[in-house]
Image (cartoon, helix red, strand yellow):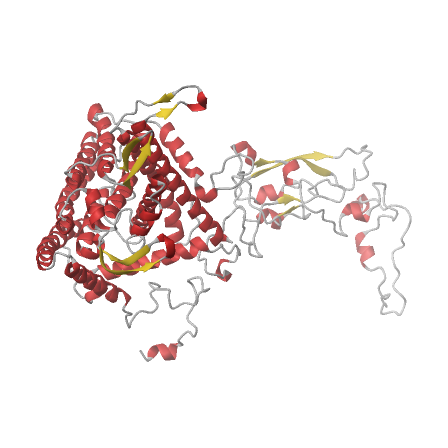
Amino acid sequence: MAYKATKNLTGDLRERLYLPELLRGLAITTRHFLRNLFNPRDTNVEVVDRKGPNLVSTVSYPEEKTPYPPGYRGLHRLVPREDGKPRCVACYMCATICPAQCIYIEAGEYETSDPASESRVIEKYPTQFVIDELRCIVCGLCVDACPKDAIRMDTGLHTPSEYNRLGFVWDIPKLLQGPAVSHPSDPWNKRASSAPPPHQHREPHIRIGEGLVPLKLPSGEPHKRTEVTDQPIPVTRFLKE
Amino acid sequence: MKALQVVIAIGVIFGIIFGLSAASYWLGAWIESGFYLPFGIGPLVKAGLPGWAWVSNLLILVLVFVMVIATFLTLAERKWSAMMQDRIGPNRATIEVPGLRGRSLGGVFHIATDALKMLTKEDFRPKNADPLLFNLGPILAFAPVLALFAVVPVGPQVTVNRFDAVHRIGLQVANPDFGMLWIFAIASLAVYGTSLAGWASNNKFALLGGVRAASQMISYEVALGLGLVGAMMAFSTVRLPDLIQGQTVQLWGGSVHLGSTGPLAFGIPAWGIFLQPVGFIIFFAAAFAETKRAPFDVPEGESEIIGYFVEYSGMKFGLFMISEFAEVVILAAVTTAIFLGGWHIGFAGDAWLTRNLAGSPIVLGAVYATIFWVKVLVLCYIQLAIRWTFPRFRYDQIQTLGWKILLPQALANVFITGALILLDPSLRWLAIVGFVEIGFVLALALRRKDQEVGHGADDAHLPADAHGHAPPAALPGPAAASHH
């Protein structure tokens, strides 16, 4: 089908003569050229705030970086404890929830006889914690799933470029970075050592009532509490009774 | 600070051009008159080769000036287009040399990376392509372009007195009587390269591109030739040095006396662009179509409608590219010689300069040659700016422009020019009509239209530091908008 080219003769003399418009076009490009040639470039990374006669709006990336928005989820990291070991307790929650299945964990268990101080405070630790950064979709579900605040996306970084695919498989030495995080509820903060705690284990429903105003029975007698003994209460007692 | 750097860089470029021009004159004088062997190891070789200065001109003008400028234009095309479009452009290639580490120097190292890429890429030939014709294509596209430069005079003929003999050295490879006709003849040959490339590639799209190239180039040959007829008539010659000499005549002017250096004449010269503005536009447009660059790049259409060199890779493609840029340089040189007064300043001081530098003819010649090359570089810039300003013409528009607009105008220009020369052989009436034409176009271009807001077409109304994106001072509210 032949294209029917129509002549548009609606323009005024300047447009139909073409030459004046041509000169105006050249003037525009030349004005931009000269302004950009003779004036230094404003390197403000907020491009809309750039001032000055130079009109270049490029952010020259590796040297200048646009700041990320506050909600940006960057490259994840394994959060270290204050002693430098990962907070991770190898519970597999992140690996389970990961929609891209990019997290691989091998759990190790602290030996009972391990002299290390926290040996029984936490029982498991990751011997392998590997994230395939090429598969990761940066959804952040692992951060939400982690019960121990052991994986975070607060670095604000991209995954750096690599020369081969194996370089994108990040293991513990690469993932374990950033400032250490500590919570009062961390088990290793609650107990000074792995020795048995100083207090006695007490039955939970007894402890619930501790420190409350004693109940009054309808007969007027004070409620008689269950005696707290120093003897450990065998758990099997409830099952037998 | 940056402006200072730019000015210094421009000065360095002018200095290099001046030095190379002087070297060219020197080499010509050496070849003509003989030379000493270096370091005192030999006697004076007095057996010069009189009349062989064209060898040095061939080497330095064609192989150094044209090729180097064309090579730099490949970079300039990208860098300048970036600056016209508010980008930065190529700046990543650096070399690991102390002092230059991490500095791109405006991207000059990209030339080396481009050349290396072209030379090391696979030289692919389609399966059923004719090997002979396929290899001949880029050669035939490239060779005529360089041959075109043979008749372009870059510098004046100066008299060098060396070893008790007088030699006349000019910066021109050959000065035949047929001057401009050589340009027409050789420019027509370039079409063979493109058509052969399209035909021999054994590719339907390449063939179509070759056909487009052939028809476009043949169409514009007519306008190309007729556009120059007016200039030939006005200066009554087809030899380019004589054309340049004819443009030194000052139509109107006066002179001031500058002490011991003698009178300094100034005025309006009889440049071709003043006498023949229509001829200039026709020639420039037609020659632009011959270079196959945007807005006449229908034969190539690299990104959309692939053209005659689709199947070429490596340095064969590089030859097509570099011949395009060499054409840009040569078109600029020919236009300078015919329409912009060649190596003359024109408006003031040519005779004064010649008189005061008569003692050192090579410096004089080099100064004039530098002026020539500066004009060439300005025209190269204009060509690149045109390429980055205008959208591509549709194919029927190209043929319409060539046959229905440029050709009748060229014919009319020939008759009007002839009548005006007949009326006034001093060319003043011709110049007056030319100035009226130029003034008409400029007045139209500078006239401000009423409805010209909000298109972004003209950012002149923005404040100087607005960065081209400034919103209007007060946005019209919906109530105000509804009144329109």
Q: Position of residue B107 (x, y in %)?
A: 44, 42
Q: Nearer the viewer, residue B307 or B369?
A: B369
- Is B176 situated left or right of A73 in this image? left
User: Is A144 drawn above or below residue A162 in the view shown?
Assistant: below
- Is B330 situated left or right of A219 in this image? left
User: Is B436 drawn above or below residue B332 in the view shown?
Assistant: below
Q: Position of residue B139 (x, y in %)?
A: 24, 30
- Is A88 situated left or right of B234 in this image? right
- Is A177 situated left or right of B127 in this image? right
Q: Quadrant of residue B481?
A: bottom left
Q: Nearer the viewer, residue B472 or B458?
A: B458
User: Is B204 drawn above or below residue A19 in the view shown?
Assistant: above
Residue drawn where x is 31% and y is 45% of the image? B372
Q: Nearer the viewer, residue A88 or B236?
A: B236
Residue drawn where x is 34% and y is 78% of the image? B482
* Viewer can see residue B313: no
* Viewer can see residue B374: yes
Q: Position of residue B347 (x, y in %)?
A: 29, 56
Q: Quadrant of residue B141?
A: top left
Q: Nearer the viewer, residue B1 or B291?
A: B1
How many labels sit on residues?
0
Q: Position of residue B384 (x, y in %)?
A: 31, 48
